Amino acid sequence: MISKKFGADKTAVVIGAGFAGIATALRLKALGYEVTLLERLDSLGGRAQVFERGGYRHDAGPTVITAPFLFDELFELFDEKLSDYLEFVPLDPFYRFHFADGSQFDYRASIEDTLTEIRRFSNDDADGYLKLLDQSKKVYDVAFKQLVHRPFTRIWDMAKQVPALIILKCYKTVSQMVNSHLKHPLIRQAFSIHPLLVGGNPFKTTAIYSLIHYLERRWGVFFCMGGTGKLVEALGALMTRQGVNVVLNADVDEIVVVNKKATGIRLNNDAVIEADLVVFGGDPETCYQHLLPKTKFSLPSIKKQYSMGLYVLYFGTKKLYPDVAHHSIWMGPRFKELLSEIFDAKKMSDDFSLYVHRPTATDKSFAPEGCESFYVLCPVPNLQGNVDWSIEGERLRDRIVDALEKTILPELSSVIDEVFWMTPENFAKDYRSMHGAGFSIEPRLTQSAWFRYHNRDSAISNLYFVGAGTHPGAGLPGVVSSAKVVEELLTGVEVGSGG
């Protein structure tokens, strides 16, 4: 174990107080650094903001918690217990799928219950699911337990993993991996959607991400009582107790570089904060284009295909919907073709698929008595497409409300309350996301590990990166694990996966 004096008498500035920035600030503090965490918004959490409208509460960003031990570890750094401050509630089903033909499939918390659900569609696929799960465990044992939290700053780091990845057939896509074990078209869809949760098209995302199946089965799917915002609040309080200096409404204009070394940052009010190391917790390309323009350092020469954009519709209802699950996946009539239009053609389609979050299924505090709170996420083209969101935002709202009213939320149009939405333009403006992408660059094989933005800049030795755009990638497990990668780069000591 690294001595907490490792960073003694050293200072660190972390830019961006999303989950990656918070986790990094805590890990640096545990190493002994004096840490300043800067956030340009007026609250912690990055994309995990909380919206309050007319008595309804909405988690603005991530809603699904997997690999909960990653958050336990942050409290354990300081000999505290997360359970003293937060309650993580396991969900069952993990997700409820609603297909276009009217059928329903519950992805359950136990294997046996999941197999029972699968057999309603195909007896053969029950055995196929077990084989898929076994393959997922093999990928998990290598990719998650051994690679996720390890640095990939040298080509050799990647090259030495190639044999294992080839044996595990990670050159295939998630869809190819799933389809090799499952035959029913709807069950194939259900077990191919996981890349979309981290910004990837399952028909192009490397099969490394098939590990998510086993990750969920190994650890479960959880909801934090009080919401993700409550988790952010507890982590903020932990930082306060440990002496991390958190500065909100702090907009960074420049990372100051002298002789290929970051010496600190300059805020938009011209104030300068000096530091021995700088960590950027936002979209890496945003950093290179906007915070390092005077250094004349070029962007890393990697192929950049960005994730889809997100349209997020928030509303309450003056009616209860007790039959709607906490997490629902509402599938449209097309799957592969729709994703191709979103990711490749970058055009709006006549149909869509949706992720529906009903937190009031588990936590009644999210809405007034007798009411429900909803968050509906719709994958859409990012801003590289030609979509006029001043028009399409309202149109898409109406189309989504109409579709849900005809299926899982009857009478929605007459009971809907306090409606608002976010588009890729909001992601670009509020979070400085390149092209308004929801998850930075896509998790393709050619954009993973060494091929992704590196966690340490190749020219500026004390400039580090955490978050969705760098290794290991998007999603809460990925961004929180990126803080471990930075710790290993600093100390030279491997940080365990915990899983």
Image: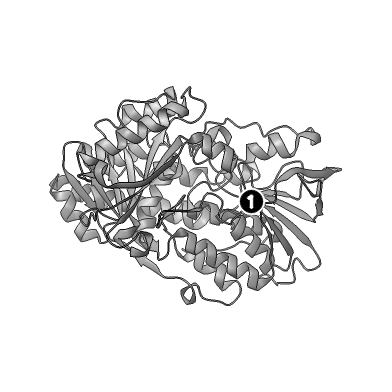
What residue is rendered at 70% in x and 72% in y?
A: 3
Q: In this view, does 34 lie to the left or right of 169?
A: right
Give above or below for 197 relative to 369. above
What residue is rendered at 46% in x and 71% in y?
A: 86
- Horizontal and vertical percent position of residue 50: 48, 54
What residue is rendered at 35% in x and 36% in y?
A: 397
Instruction: Tell me which corner region of the image, top left, top right, bottom left or bottom right, holds residue 22.
Output: bottom right
Instruction: Tell me which corner region of the image, top left, top right, bottom left or bottom right, holds residue 98.
Output: top left
Q: Mark 1 points at which residue?
A: 16
- Horizontal and vertical percent position of residue 312: 41, 42
- Horizontal and vertical percent position of residue 357: 34, 51
Tag 1: Cα neighbours inside 10 Å, few (<14), some, or many (≥20)? many
Total labels: the figure holds 1
Give above or below for 466 relative to 284. below
Give the residue type at disc 1.
Answer: Gly
Give above or below for 136 relative to 74. above
Q: Can residue 149 be seen in this view?
A: no
